[in-house]
Amino acid sequence: MKFNTKIPKHLKQAYNQELKQYSFCLENKQFGNAWYHLERSHIIGQSYPIEHTYSHWLMLKFGFIQKDTKEVIGQIIRLLVGGWKSFINHVPLGNTGGANVPPLKRMPIPNDIEKLLDIK
């Protein structure tokens, strides 16, 4: 069994770039774009416990900002289980992480992220 502990440098850079874009959009009240970048950060970081958990933490905070009860509850549940599933490399690749999708559903990965992940 493969254990994921540390995100590779090139993925960390892409993950951080998505978080910068998220922050910029949030500060400028571009909430749809902010959420888009949070979803992308989740896809990039979901195989690594720290990044995966942090994406869900930000999604929880975003749910509070938006006063979205479904999102808040969904993120609390994901925060409880997401990190350990990353550690044992048992995540549904491509899942965007929001409460609007089932937590175990595999989803298509955007082409640019697929290239980063080197998935065939």
Image: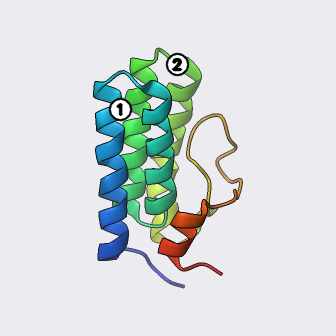
Element class at badge 1: helix
The reply to whether residue 7 is visible in this rendering is no
Instruction: Judge by depth and name the residue closer to the eye, 77 or 60.
Output: 60
Judged left or right of residue 42, residue 18 is: left
Which image quarter: residue 48? Answer: bottom left
Residue 60 vertical position relative to residue 55 in the rendered view, above or below = above
Q: Quadrant of the N terminus?
A: bottom right
- Circle 2 Cα neighbour tier, 10 Å, few/some/many (<14 / 14–19 / ≥20): few
| Residue found at x 40% / y 62% | 49
Q: Position of residue 82 (x, y in %)?
A: 50, 53
On-image quarter of the C terminus: bottom right
Q: Say the numbered circle drawn on residue 47.
A: none
Identity of the amino acid at label 2? Answer: Asp
- Residue 68, numbered circle: 2
Q: Circle 1 sits on which residue?
A: 25
Residue 35, position in %: x, y?
A: 48, 35
Q: Earlier in the sequence, mark 1 or mark 2?
A: 1
How many numbered callouts?
2
